[in-house]
Image (cartoon, rainbow, N blue to C red):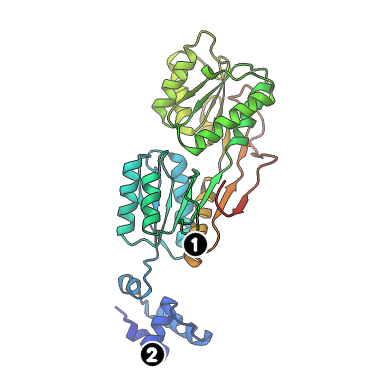
Amino acid sequence: MATMTDVARSAGVSVATVSHVLNDTRPVLPHTRQAVLDAVEELGYTPNTLARSLVTSRTRSIGLAVSAISNPYFTEILQGVETAALEHGYGLLVADPHDDPEHERKVAQLLHERRVDGMIVAPSADPRELVAYLGRHRVPTVFLDRLVDTPDGDDAPRFDQVRAESAEPTTRLVTHLAGLGHRRIGLVAGRPGLSTTHERITGYRHGLAAAGLPYDERLLVHGDSEAAGGERATADLLSLAVPPTALVTANNAMTIGALRALRDRGLSVPDDLALCCFDDFAWADLFSPRLTAVAQPSRELGAQALRLLLDRLAAPDAPVRSVRLPCAFVHRTSCGCPEPSDRPEQFEHASAKAQEGNPP
């Protein structure tokens, strides 16, 4: 196995110069750098990652804490993070916090103890312990998908954030159903406390108002962002004396639960109940009818989170950034419309936004 000494001998430079090239610890003349890189390639030299981390105080590894195992939406985000990380020469350590506040703090500590250079985290509904730990240890972190309120002040930790638009796309689903003649439109919302849940409820109420429909609190139920919860919440709606004629489900897992509840009662979509869902997923057009949905830019969210984190590692004192990415409306047939084009439509007012300073 080739050693750093072998590389230095082949390139005609000192071992120290090879170290500076590989670790970016000192500027090296371009022709010298290229000679070292050519020698590395020719000899098949593999750097000692542990030794390099001792020199640079960096492990070139990123910690990712998302509920990837239980939620296919986060699985796609993971793929976006991983692809971008590999492109920049970083490895990925993945842990599932299970959307549990105590467990997510333990996960953050575990990743921190593995000496990751920074973390990307999809926080739970109560991330106070997580924020306290990350802030106390000054861990470079990007919060993903869900907005987190963080302390103000010059000494406050700097947490960048990236997520997709939530309110406006939900409004679009409601107004689309109202435009088809529906006057009782239900919402199966996510876990209380999550910023995405709050924003989608806001979008739901704005959609009702825009359509001139009254808000009825009985038509808004929480499915806790899980399939079982979505099934239970949909059953509750169907048990009302006057049930809804249309339904919006606020994530992919709850959509599955809603479909189970409808199947168990022998009801069909869209004949008995029109359905629109937040989160498109790979098999949404395999259902019968095919699901009308909001498609989030899952992989781009992951890639953007990785880029924000690398920027934070390069400039720890830079202003905080809060980025929103647009969603798309995928018009299919579960809403009761005839077979449309599958071409996703960008929301008119949704655009990527980067804001300097503390997130709103």
**Horizontal arrangement in the rendering, residue 235 relative to residue 304 (left or right):** left
Question: In terms of image quadrants, where is residue 209?
Answer: top right
In the rendered view, tell whether residue 326 sits above or below residue 116.
Answer: above
Numbered disc 1: secondary structure: helix
Q: Position of residue 230 (x, y in %)?
A: 44, 25
Residue nearest the observer in this picture, 268 or 234: 234
Residue nearest the observer in this picture, 83 or 137: 137
**Horizontal arrangement in the rendering, residue 110 relative to residue 74 (left or right):** left
Q: Report whether residue 292 is seen.
A: no
In the rendered view, tell whether residue 117 sits above or below residue 184.
Answer: below
| Residue ID at (42%, 38%) | 125
Q: Residue furthest bottom?
A: 12
Q: What amino acid is labelled 2 in the image?
A: Ser
In the rendered view, tell whether residue 302 sits above or below residue 2.
Answer: above
Q: Position of residue 167 (x, y in %)?
A: 59, 35
Residue pointed to by mark 2: 14
Residue pointed to by mark 1: 312
Q: Quadrant of the N terminus?
A: bottom left
Q: Position of residue 204 (x, y in %)?
A: 59, 28
- Residue 244: image tag: none
| Residue ID at (37%, 80%) | 43
| Residue ID at (47%, 50%) | 151
- The earlier-in-sequence mark between 1 and 2 is 2
